Image (cartoon, grey):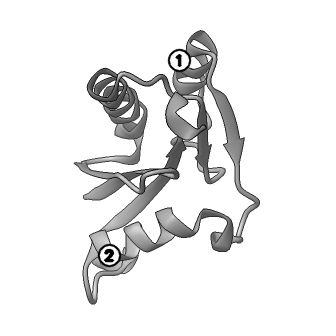
Amino acid sequence: MYLATFVDDYSSLSVVCPIKAKSDVAGVTIDVINMLEKQSGWPLLVVRSDNGSEYINSTLSTFFKEKGVLCQTTVRYTPEQNGKAERLNRNAAGPGASHAGGLGAAEDTVGGGGHHG
């Protein structure tokens, strides 16, 4: 099992979704973004993610392009660029959890919403 985590950079609102495979990330990402946009009334402006193929793919590229969302990626092996998401991943996994134990974490920092000022 994996966890797909989403963090709003402005408000620190977090969403954690359990998924069976990393290939499920695209569908879950689209569902979470649509839900949060509907609930908040604000459009997503920017998505920041690691360079993982679960986020850099044609499904999400098309989705973000159609919505006019700017996509940013962090530099490989620099978790400090994604600090909030990294902390959420550690907390969501729980104490003692590890990748070897079967729990991984896909990360996505979502910064957006027209309310940033």
Residue 36 at least partly seen: yes
In the rendered image, residue 74, in percent from the top left (x then y), is placed at 71, 55
- Secondary structure beneath dot 2 equals helix
Q: Who is closer to the viewer here, 27 or 38?
A: 38
Secondary structure, mark 1, is helix
Give the residue number, with chain letter if any, for mark 1: 63
Is 62 above or below relative to 70?
A: above
* Of residues 31 and 19, the one drawn nearer to the viewer in this rendering: 31
Q: Mark 2 points at which residue?
A: 91
Depicted 43 relative to depicted 84: above or below: above
Q: What residue type is labelled 1?
A: Phe
Q: Quadrant of the C terminus?
A: top right
Whole-percent x, y for residue 66 in the image: 58, 10
Q: Which residue is drawn at 70% across and 48% down?
A: 73
The residue shown at (26%, 87%) is: 95
Q: From where the camera sits, is residue 102 visible?
A: no
Instruction: Residue at 31%, 56% (x, y): give it.
Output: 3
Q: Which mark is residue 22?
A: none
